[in-house]
Image (spheres, helix red, strand yellow):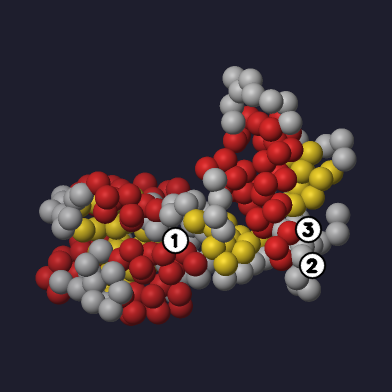
Amino acid sequence: MRVLVVEDEVRMAALLRRGLEEDGYAVDVAATGPDALWQGREVDYDAVVLDVMLPGADGFEVCRRLRESGRWAPILMLTARDAVDDRIRGLDAGADDYLPKPFSFGELAARLRALIRRGATDRPTVLAAGDLRLDPASRRAWRGEDELALSTKEFALLELFLRHPDQVLSRTTILEHVWDFAYDGVSNVIDQYVSYLRRKIDKPYGSEMLETVRGAGYRLRAPGPSGDPVAG
C-alpha cells in the first residue's frame, strides 16, 4: 500500500512517515499544496493523509482539485482546528474522513486501514452533463459560464436528473425522490417543475437536454462529442 502524507510541519511529517512505514506502508511526503497536487495526480496512491494548513494551497483546495482531476484515493484530512464548519467543508470537498489534532497515531492508523479496505470509488463532487454542472455542497448550478437561479425543488429535480443521466425517470420515481410518498399536492406538479426547469436549462440555450419520454417519464440526455444530445 502506498500512501501520500501531506504535512508542512517537518517533525509531524517525519513522525507520520516513520509510523506508517513501521506499519508496512510505502510513504511519500509533500510539504506544500502544489507539491501535493502534482504528486497526487502523478501517482496512483492507495490513500492520502492531508493536513489542512498548507502553504501554496490549503488542504480543502488540494482535496477538491484532486477530485476534479479524477483522483479517487481515500483522503483522511488532519487539522488543528476542530470546528464543525471545517469538518463539513472538508467532507464537502471530497474527503472521506476527518481527524483533528492532536490525535493518537493508533487511531489514525485504524482510520487509514478502514479507508483502504473501503477502496477508491468514483464519486465526483460536482455533477455534470455537457456544460450543465451542479455542485450539491454549495447548492449552485451552471449552464456554461452562466449560474442558474433555481428554486429548492428545481435544484433537487436537476440533481436527480444529473445523478441519472440518459436514464428515463418515471413520475413516481421523481415524486419519491424530490417530494415524498405522502405528498398530496396537485397531480401535475412534476410536469410543472420539469417545465420550469426547461425554461432555465434548455430554452435560453436553444437545446433540448431534458426530454419527455411518452408514457414513461423524463430523461436528461447527456450531450455527445458534438455537443448535441445523444440519440436514444
Task: Give the x, y percent position of residue 73.
Answer: 44, 61
Q: Can residue 157 be seen in this view?
A: yes
Q: Is mark 3 on a helix, strand or loop?
A: loop
- The amino acid type of the residue labelled 3 equals Glu
Between 143 and 204, the one lying in front of the other is 204
**Disc number lying in front (3 or 1):** 3
Task: Give the x, y percent position of residue 148.
Answer: 56, 58
- The quadrant holding residue 188 is top right
Structural distance between the alpha carbons of marks 2 and 1: 33 Å
Q: Which residue is rendered at x = 44% and y = 52% of the image?
A: 137
Q: In which quarter of the image is the C terminus?
A: bottom right
Residue annotated with mark 2: 228
**As drawn, is 26 to the left or to the right of 185?**
left
Residue annotated with mark 3: 208
Callout 1: few (<14), some (14-19), or many (20+) C-alpha neighbours within 10 Å? many
Q: In which quarter of the image is the N terminus?
A: bottom left
Q: Which residue is rendered at x = 67% and y = 49% of the image?
A: 197
**As drawn, is 170 to the left or to the right of 34?**
right
